Image: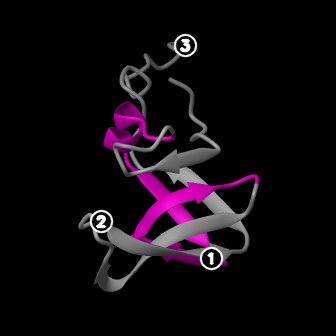
Amino acid sequence: MSDTPPDHLSTNPKSPHFNMEVLQRGIGIRFKGRERKDVEEYSISEGWIRVAAGKTRDRNGNPLTIKLTGPVEAWFENPAEGADEDKPADAE
């Protein structure tokens, strides 16, 4: 798995942009210079995030979301499996 997070990712299992393997690694999102933990979906190239609009629900019981536009940065919070192995130090 690469060290760059996907351009578009969603936490909703019904979305075509849902990816459980990536979500298990943990994704950090910075939106307009502020770290956010409430992001439901994001797109780096298009510059937007979706966040829940309070406790409001739609008729299917899913949280209503609002789309906020601005600069989006994403990173992995945990390293990929196998990438964190101890490497031997150079012996002199």
Distance, label 2 to label 3, CA atoms, is: 60 Å
- Any mark on residue 62, and which? 2
How packed mark 2 is, by other alpha carbons closer than 10 Å (few <14, some 14-19, many 20 or more), is few
- Residue annotated with mark 3: 92
The type of residue carrying mark 3 is: Glu
Magenta stretch? 17-45
Q: Earlier in the sequence, mark 1 or mark 2?
A: 2
Q: Secondary structure at mark 2?
A: loop
Instruction: From the image, state whether disc 3 or disc 1 is nearer to you.
Output: 1
Residue behind mark 1: 68
In the picture as drawn, the residue positioned furthest to the front comes out as: 59
Which of the two marks, 2 or 3, is nearer to us in this view? 2
Residue type for callout 1: Leu
Q: Earlier in the sequence, mark 3 or mark 1?
A: 1
Q: Position of residue 86 (x, y in %)?
A: 37, 23
As helix, strand or loop, the secondary structure at mark 1 comes to strand
Position of residue 46 measured from the top left corner of the image (x, y, whole percent) = 75, 57
Please rate how many residues cluster around mark 1, counting C-alpha atoms within 10 Å: few if below 14, some from 14 to 19, many from 20. Answer: few
The answer to whether residue 23 is magenta is: yes
Q: Could you say which is closer to the camera, residue 4 or residue 71?
A: 71
Mark 2: amino acid: Asn
* Residue nearest the viewer, comparing 91 with 1: 1
Alpha-carbon distance for marks 3 and 1?
54 Å
Q: Position of residue 52 (x, y in %)?
A: 40, 76
Q: Is 12 rendered above or below residue 51?
A: above
